[in-house]
Image (cartoon, rainbow, N blue to C red):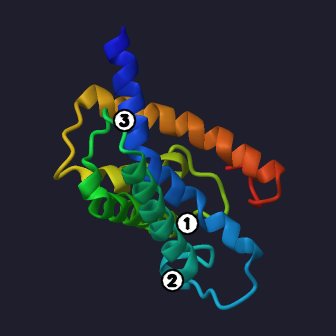
Amino acid sequence: MADAGLRVLQVLYLMAPAYAANMAPPFLRFWHGWNPPLQRRLFGAHKTVLGFAAGVAAGLAAAWLQARIGWAHARIAPADWAATGLALGFGAMAGDALKSFCKRRAGRAPGAPWPPFDQLDFVAGALLLVAPWVDLRVDEVALVLGLSFLGDLLVNRLAFRLGIKDTPW
């Protein structure tokens, strides 16, 4: 059982930069300067240049912090923090943007709920980009998807109640 608990911590620790990346863009609602949409017609007005950049930066910052912590059971070597942070941060933002693109093509309104894609888009993008150098078992990927789905629901509801997000999803 201890081994299973360690594996849960390892995969959550691995995904922390992607989680940080996903949480960063909503805070830009408080920024009133330049922040144009990435491409309004393709992704909608809510996917912005600074939001994307903030997500990637948050992923890099989280990975940098992990490298400084140097947890002995981490799946990524501290020396690989930059590549890991970039892959997880960019992957999370790219996954979110791709979901928005698909959502527009499916005729879904911006801000309308689209489960489970709204909860797992960033996770799928992050996992795809980090897959070349992180060996995750199928059960570990399923664990990440399940915990991320539940965690995203909880965090988004909290962000909504705190006024950080316009919708609870």
Image position of 3 with respect to 92: above or below: above
Q: Which mark is residue 107?
A: 1
Q: Residue at x 42, y 46 (%)?
A: 69
- Give the CA distance from mark 3 to mark 2: 31 Å
Using the image, determine if residue 86 lies above or below residue 53. above
Residue receiving disc 3: 11
Q: Mark 2 highlights which residue? A: 38
Residue 115 point in image, percent of width and height? 55, 45
Residue 87, horizontal then vertical, whole percent:
32, 61
Residue 48 appears in the picture as rendered: no
Front label number (3 vs 1): 3
The quarter holding residue 59 reads: bottom left
Task: Judge left or right: residue 42 versus residue 72.
Answer: right
Tell which of 43 and 63 is nearer to you: 63
Q: Helix or strand or loop: what does disc 3 sit on?
A: helix
| Location of the N terminus (image quadrant) | top left
Label at residue 151: none
Residue at 27%, 40% (x, y): give it: 75
SS at badge 1: loop
**Along the horizontal axis of the image, is 155 left or right of 40?**
right
Is tag 3's residue or tag 1's residue first in the polypeptide sequence? 3
Give coordinates of residue 105: x percent, y percent: 47, 69
